[in-house]
Amino acid sequence: MNVLVGFTPFIAFFVLLKLVSPLAGLVSAMVVSVLLCVRTRARHESLKILELGSVVVFVALVLYTLVAAPVWTVATVRLAADSGLLAIVLFSLAIGRPFTLQYARERVPEQYWSSPLFLTTSRRIAIVWAGSFAVHAAADAAAQYLPAIPLFIDIAASLGTLAAALWFTFWYPAVARRAAAADAVPPG
């Protein structure tokens, strides 16, 4: 699913954060975000909320890092990035355009785009992603501000909820279609 491509800036961030430094992770994520937007425009497609939001989040974090020179720990910089990702998803839900909708429209025929089932399915998937990112941010905060909680708990919680959100994203649309089809069959 193309939604995974939308998360590549965050993947680049997490990889380079661990391998090089927080600033390297932030800059790489910013560059990947910009390149995703350029790629989307070059294909004459509309920019997606996740892509644009990623540019905003990572440009802001890079500028903040360069100007304020914070001492980032792994947990605090992850908290900043995960909070930014959560904000993108919540914003998309608040404006009634779940970030998942734009990706779903790439796979579903246009005749279904305004159907209640399609819209509800997309909203529910976005809500699951929001829950996952809320857990990420909470785990990051706990790792930073509660010394008794080791960083591996933060990472395990993040990976577990990420896997659950991915699974739900691929599993739920078929379940929703089957339930709608069962409801459409007249009792006999």
Image (cartoon, rainbow, N blue to C red):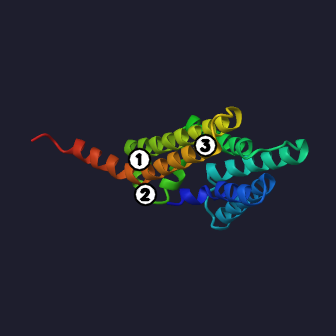
- Vertically, is 14 above or below 83? below
Residue that protrudes farthest toward the top in the picture:
146
Between discs 2 and 1, the one toward the N terminus: 2
Nearer the observer: mark 2 or 3; the answer is 3
Pointers 3 and 1 in contact (C-beta within 8 Å): no
- Location of residue 162 in the rendering, given as x and y in whole percent from the top left corner: 52, 49
User: Circle 3 is placed at which residue position?
Assistant: 154
Q: Quadrant of the C terminus?
A: top left
In space, the residues marked 2 and 3 are separated at their CA atoms by 36 Å
Q: Secondary structure at mark 3?
A: helix
- Location of residue 68 in the rendering, given as x and y in whole percent from the top left corner: 89, 41
Q: Secondary structure at mark 2?
A: loop
Left or right: 13 as drawn, with respect to 5: right
Q: Amino acid at mark 1?
A: Phe
- Location of residue 28 in the rendering, given as x and y in whole percent from the top left corner: 75, 59
Q: Amino acid at mark 2?
A: Val
Q: Quadrant of residue 83?
A: top right
- Vertically, is 36 above or below 83? below
Q: Residues within 10 Å of mark 3 (few under 14, many from 20)?
A: many
User: Circle 2 is placed at which residue position?
Assistant: 108
Q: Residue at x 84, y 46 (%)?
A: 65
Q: Amino acid at mark 3?
A: Asp
Left or right: 170 as drawn, with respect to 99: left
- Between 90 and 157, the residue placed more toward the observer is 157
